[in-house]
Image: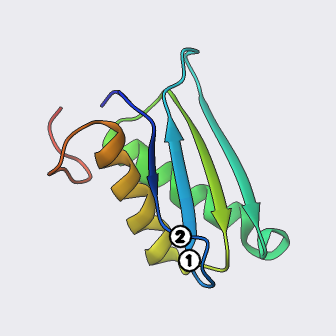
Amino acid sequence: MEIKQPAIAGTLESSDVQVILHPNSEDELKIQLQSIVESQFGDSILQTVKEVLDAFGIKRAIVSLNDKGALDWVIRARVQAACCRATARPFCWEGEDQ
C-alpha cells in the first residue's frame, strides 16, 4: 500500500502510544521512537512496528512513535489504525490485497 496522507492514531495518555505516519518521498522506511521504556523494550517495539508495516506492504514512510508504556497489542493496533488512515482506506487489515 502507498501512504497518501499523514495520519495519527493513539494518544499521549499513560499506557498508550501515539503513532504518526507520513509519506516519504525517499524510497525508504524511517522509524523514530521516543519511549519511556526504550532502553528495555525499544528493539521489541521497533520489531512490532516493522511487522505491521510489512504486513500492509508499506515500504516508504516516516513513522514517529511516542510511547508511554503501551503493550505490544496496543502498539500493533495503533500502527494498523494509522496505516488505514494514511492509505485512505477506511476498511483495511494486514495482508489485504492491494
Report helix, strand or loop for mark 1: loop
70 to the left or right of 51: right
Which residue type carries mark 2?
Thr
- The residue positioned 25% from the left and 37% from the top of the image is 88
Residue farthest bottom in this picture = 14
Asked if the residues shown at circle 1 and circle 2 are in contact, with their CB atoms under 8 angstroms apart, the answer is: yes
> Residue 2 in the image: x percent, y percent?
34, 27
Which colour scheme appears in the figure? rainbow
Q: Provide the residue designation for mark 1.
A: 16
Q: Is residue 46 above or below residue 88?
A: below
- The residue positioned 55% from the left and 16% from the top of the image is 27
- The residue positioned 41% from the left and 43% from the top of the image is 54
Which residue type carries mark 1?
Asp
> Residue 37 in the image: x percent, y percent?
77, 76
Q: Residue 11 got which mark?
A: 2
Q: Is residue 73 above or below residue 79?
A: below
Of the pair 21 and 43, the residue shown nearer to us: 21
